[in-house]
Amino acid sequence: MLAATTLGPAVSGFIAMLMLAGTMAACRAEELPGVAASGFAFKGSGLCVKCHRTEQGEWCDVATTTVWRHDAHSRSHLALLPDNPRTRAMEHALGIKAAETVSCVACHTHPAAEPPPEEEDDVVHAGISCETCHGAGAGYFEPHMEKRWRFLSVAEKGVLGMRDLRDPVLKAENCLSCHLGDVASGRVISHAMYAAGHPPLPAFEMETFSRAMGPHWKRVWEKAPRVQAAAAAAGYHTEAASETHRALVGTLVALRSSATLVQDYARLAAEPGDRPQAPWPELALYDCQACHHDLRIPSGRQAAGYGRLVPGRPTIARWPRAAAGVALAVAGQPDDVEALLSPWVAVLNRRPFGADADLEPGAPESLERIDAAIRALQAVRRDDGLDDRRREIAERLSAAGLRCGDIDSARLVAWIMLGAMEGNAAWPAEARDAVAANLARDAAIGVPRPPAEAAALPPFWQTSLEAAANANLETLRSAFRLPPAAQGSGR
């Protein structure tokens, strides 16, 4: 509950009424048009734009919509139009209408309960909206205009329906619900969809992809000194110590999500009754390279190993594992990711694809270890020792990269490693640039680009496929060697 002193009597009273209304609405949310599962109604991006098209003082000093309107998310609905050749081919192959198919609409447009824009213009589009990511706005729309709102906890904001994306866990979960998948919201790409032409989802690293979006926000430490001082005085701490720590949190959320996605789908498939939307097994939930690899000797697939899995059995997504191992180690946890995933792998080893209802034994302990590591990383404070910690993380990531067995895992490691080196006194800018050049040239590790640059380049998923097809494991690993750190710059 929100304390009465948090926002002042008037606003607190208003919040109390909203909380009561929200609780009542939650009981019948599915029965009400325009209401989210949280129990709050959607306001529509048109109202957000009224303020956020301009800078909002020292705290919110970025004109968010002037950035967002150029982002691919805001126009993601265009992929569903029938004049899109790929969409037309998929619709023909699958016998569907993309704009009427839950799994398509769930990721490519705003929530169905959200009022659509009356008219699209230079700022408002019908794709992913403000409330798609931040939550249905009726509960927090007016309270979030109050100055004291900014220092509320993530939980307090969540009571009013806001998904506070300054929290790296909430942000990673939100992003991964589309970029990996989420059963509850219907965001699952099927094997049939891939076979019909849906582009493969590349490995996803939250901070790297966020930079490519063109951020429509500022971290607290990027704001004016007066705002930073106010945040410190209020004990405001939601963002993790740095982008590097946020990225490590994101990889752990991805590891957890990759396992629970298979688990949730299996539970749905095992429910009694006719559920054609959840056939078992769903091959797209697994690591594609477990089946799709060159049949030759020597083989990169053999060199990569099987992670305690019987060769030939499908496995949970491979790409979060190498970086997640580093994240676990930095958090003071055992870094054997394969042991962590062994409850799920054991089921896959007993029976190809796993039995519908058997993918959970022993999993709660594994999930708690991941969550404990996340909590430890979030507890790290931003202080004078930050560069020292980022240097250690970069060195751990370099060692992990030297052991990587596939390009998707290597990409995650490389992206976070380069972020840890950026602006770090341990390495001059030219040293970081040299490492980045080696990774780009020798390991073909690309980086998602901002919209203005991406428009002139092939789609990132396409270059990802080409890089994976041409990857040389020895060259890939050697590109991760770091130059010596500057003396006296760290621990």
Image (tube, helix red, strand yellow):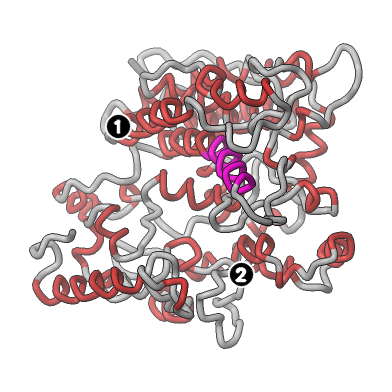
Q: Nearer the viewer, residue 5 or 35?
A: 35
Residue 438, compared with residue 52, is above or below; it is: above
Q: Is residue 261 rendered magenta in the image?
A: yes
Q: Position of residue 465 (x, y in %)?
A: 79, 39
Give the quarter of the image for residue 341: top right
- Would you name the residue on which mark 1 appears? 380
Specify the principal SS of the magenta part: helix
Query: Which residue is at a point 36% across and 62% down the rendered structure image?
Result: 162
Q: Is residue 456 left or right of residue 328?
A: right
Residue 218, compared with residue 89, is above or below; it is: above
Q: Please, what is the three-letter code of the amino acid marked with disc 1? A: Val
Q: Position of residue 54 (x, y in %)?
A: 41, 74
Q: Is residue 138 rendered magenta in the image?
A: no
Query: Which residue is at a point 48% across and 29% down the rendered structure image?
Result: 363
Quadrant assignment for the C terminus: top left
Magenta segment, which residues?
Answer: 257-270
Give the quarter of the image for residue 296: top right
Query: Which residue is at a point 61% across and 41% down the rendered structure image?
Result: 266
- Would you name the residue on which mark 2 appears? 127
Q: Position of residue 148 (x, y in %)?
A: 19, 64
Residue 58, compared with residue 173, is above or below; it is: below
Q: Nearer the viewer, residue 198 or 183?
A: 183
- The mark found on residue 328 in the picture is none
